[in-house]
Image (cartoon, rainbow, N blue to C red):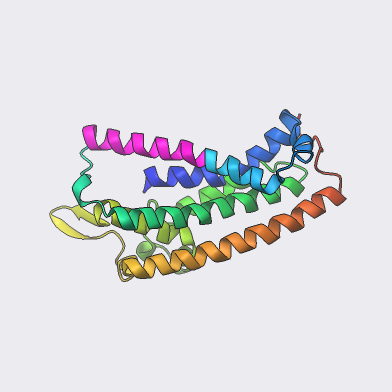
Amino acid sequence: SNALYLIAMQAIANMSWTILEDREHYRTLKYIYTAPVSLYWYLIGRATARMAIGIMTCIFLLTVGAFFLGIHLNIASIQWGWLGLYFMLGMVVLISFGIVIAGIALVVPRNGEFIGEIMAGMLLLVCSVYFPPDILPSLLRKLSLAMPVTYWLEGMRRALCGGILQMDGATGPISPMLAAHSNSGLALILAASAILSATFAYYFYQWVERLAKARGMIDMVTGY
């Protein structure tokens, strides 16, 4: 889960820094508006590139774990079809989250770079990276089950290694609550989340971009 979450971290935590770097450090954000491509699609490209770095880091960590830390990954037992489906749906959700974070950073005059890190830290706690929703307090459990990243991680774990935890001779699902969903159920949840996330991210970004233009924040310099 920790290795997989690095992909989410790249898409969520770094998108606010993308706005900060391009607008205030390199001061190229205003020039992007003169290019034929819109800033929205440019940010999608940046998020995709960031996630590619996260994927390489994830593969490296899993490889090191398999060779040196006793992580058992049977290549022959990986469910490649479900893995590909979960991965693609998760990418839509994560990129949408990144676009929303970038939009917020675009209209925040101070400390916008920390928004993505705060969001990524919150999701790290509640999205079944370290703690399954079963053991969380009631409020955090409800929040965890409302987050699509929770279902993405469960699906990825299930496709890679069956989502089974072996400890002290006992074997069982990592999260009995999430194990109640079939593979098809997880895919439907992620598909619905992807559609809703992408739709919200598009309209939210269009709104904040108009707001940023009206306030003269496209070429604003606050931190350098």
| Magenta-colored stretch includes residue 188 | no
Residue 35 percent across, percent down from the top left: 75, 38
In the rendered structure, which segment of residues is drawn in magenta? 50-68
Residue 72 percent across, percent down from the top left:
20, 44
Q: Residue at x 15, y 52 (%)?
A: 168
Using the image as rendered, state which of residue 8 and residue 171 is in the foreground.
8
Q: Quadrant of residue 170?
A: bottom left
Identified at 77% across, 41% down, the residue is 33
How would you classify the magenta stretch by its main secondary structure? helix
Farthest residue in the left direction?
Answer: 169
Q: Is residue 103 left or right of residue 149?
A: right
Residue 58 belongs to magenta span: yes
Quadrant in the picture for residue 190? bottom left
Q: How many marks?
A: 0
**Left or right relative to 221: residue 177:** left
Q: Residue furthest front?
A: 36
Residue 74 shows in the view? no
Say whether residue 22 is left or right of residue 175: right
Residue displayed at 69% across by 50% down: 103
Q: Is 103 placed above or below 61 here?
A: below
Q: Position of residue 57 (x, y in %)?
A: 41, 35
